Image (cartoon, grey):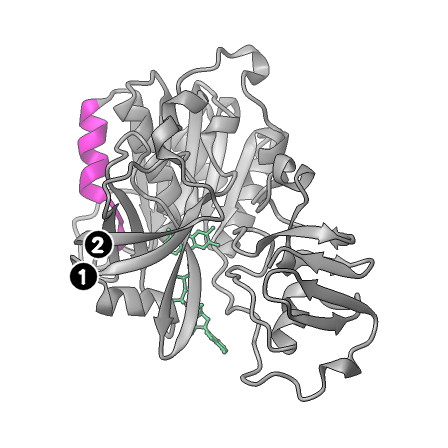
Amino acid sequence: MNVATDSCFIGQRGEMPDRFCSAATWERADAQWPSHEPRTLICTRVCAETHDVRSFVFSTRDGQLFSFEPGQFITVSAEIDGKEVSRCYTISSPPTRPYALSITVKRVPGGVMSNWLHENMREGLELKACGPSGLFTPCCAPAAKSLYLSAGSGVTPLMSMTRAALDLGLNRDIVFVHSARAPEDIIFRRELSHLCALSNKLRVVHICEAPGGEPAWTGPVGRLSLDLLMRHVPDYRDREVFVCGPAGYMEAARKMLREGGHDASRYHQESFNFAPPVACPPEPLAEPAVQSGFTVQLARSGRSFTMDASQTVLVAARKAGVPLPSSCSQGICGTCKTKVLEGAVDMKHNGGIRPREIEKGMRLMCCSRPTSNLVLDL
Ligand SMILES: Cc1cc2nc3c(=O)[nH]c(=O)nc-3n(C[C@H](O)[C@H](O)[C@H](O)COP(=O)(O)OP(=O)(O)OC[C@H]3O[C@@H](n4cnc5c(N)ncnc54)[C@H](O)[C@@H]3O)c2cc1C
């Protein structure tokens, strides 16, 4: 997550706040889903988007409505081969359709959760999820003109934003430039073309590395470049830019925009971190006491372990055989958010926690190192 997102505020640059940033639009009193609260979702539909991407649509058993901001993600958990596995997935549906929530998952070769979902998740089955998190949302930067840049499964947050903008009838000028390997890999191709037919304010450009199985492909071929951007979006410097895709793509997009004179304070990005989670030894260390330094007490479970400040609380807890909930291990997803009841930590996060949560004593264990003994609300 880009820190530029944090620095934006509603109504920046003299624009009138619109319904994208009005909390009342997304947060109905009966529809709150606090980010740390687990819910059980029921799968109502599975939809093949491409040969290796599927959307999974969920509702709740009691018909509770979903409330979130477009661009946010949930953290889903499942027991796979006897182990609890958690991963983040962006909500691809818009908050304007609160009765259902969808995630759109690309199979990652060798990946645990993405393959498990593709092979197992079916209509009627349950999935545990923790509530919406994330700051990659246009609510913090409600510009009249936006440029959405995505590659591969990075399309999902931008799709939620686009669907929401159209549902709300917002007079937003959006150019959506999506990169794919080949035409058959383009996610939401039909729906995006349908949305373009509904609104002359939305323009979609698909760039393919190669024509693949569609030799008649007439769209741009290659990779996103400044030359291509200038040709298709000549006013890109006037636009609030939201970027999501693989790390290399985002790095290239950021560099390209900087070289093209785009204002960096109007650039926002979301990282889908595919790195495997921090390795966890199967058994607790025989003698956790060999780690000296600070004592960490878990108030609710009554467990404790010792650690030094060379590692994060999450890693030390795992080494001591006390697994904490976690997902991205990079301070992005917020799964390991925990209240520090006593003591202090040095936290270096990447946008996975809000200032008001920090004020309330919450910290992300994956990027926090102790500076004193700790008592955690766990
Ligand atoms: C905020 C956020 C939002 C996201 N939204 C989406 C989304 O909308 N759609 C989507 O498809 N994805 C999304 N992701 C990515 C998603 O969370 C997962 O990372 C992705 O699905 C892969 O998970 P997995 O369990 O299948 O793979 P993992 O099991 O985590 O494996 C990932 C890769 O690491 C390799 N690997 C695993 N273990 C090891 C090991 N021990 N040694 C070496 N290599 C190993 C695997 O082969 C694979 O290539 C998002 C991520 C974040 C952080």
Q: Overall secondary structure of the magenta stretch? A: helix
Q: Earlier in the sequence, mark 2 or mark 1?
A: 2
CB-based contact (under 8 Å), mark 2 and mark 1: yes
188 lies left or right of 270: left
* Label 1 Cα neighbours within 10 Å, binned few <14 / some 14-19 / many ≥20: some
Q: Is mark 2 within 8 Å of ligand 1?
A: no
Image vertical order of residue 142 relative to residue 186, above or below: above
Residue occupying the point 56% across, 56% down: 336
Which residue is denoted by mark 2 in the rendering?
43
Callout count:
2
Residue occupying the point 47% across, 63% down: 274
Q: Amino acid at mark 2?
A: Cys
Whole-percent x, y for residue 341 in the image:
70, 51
Task: Return the mark for residue 131.
Answer: none
Of helix, strand and loop, which one carries label 2? Answer: strand
Image vertical order of residue 211 relative to residue 225, above or below: below
Foreground pick, 42 / 97? 42
Which residue is denoted by mark 1 in the rendering?
122
Whole-percent x, y for residue 240 in the image:
50, 27
* Label 2 Cα neighbours within 10 Å, binned few <14 / some 14-19 / many ≥20: many
Magenta run includes residue 188: yes
174 lies left or right of 188: right
Does residue 76 appear in the picture of this structure?
yes
Residue occupying the point 57% across, 47% down: 352
Q: Which residues are magenta?
A: 185-198
Quadrant that contains the C terminus: bottom right
Of helix, strand and loop, which one carries label 1? Answer: loop
- Residues at marks 2 and 1, CA–CA distance in whole angstroms: 6 Å
Q: Quadrant of residue 194?
A: top left
Residue occupying the point 50% across, 58% down: 273
Q: Amino acid at mark 1?
A: Arg
Q: Quadrant of residue 203?
A: top left
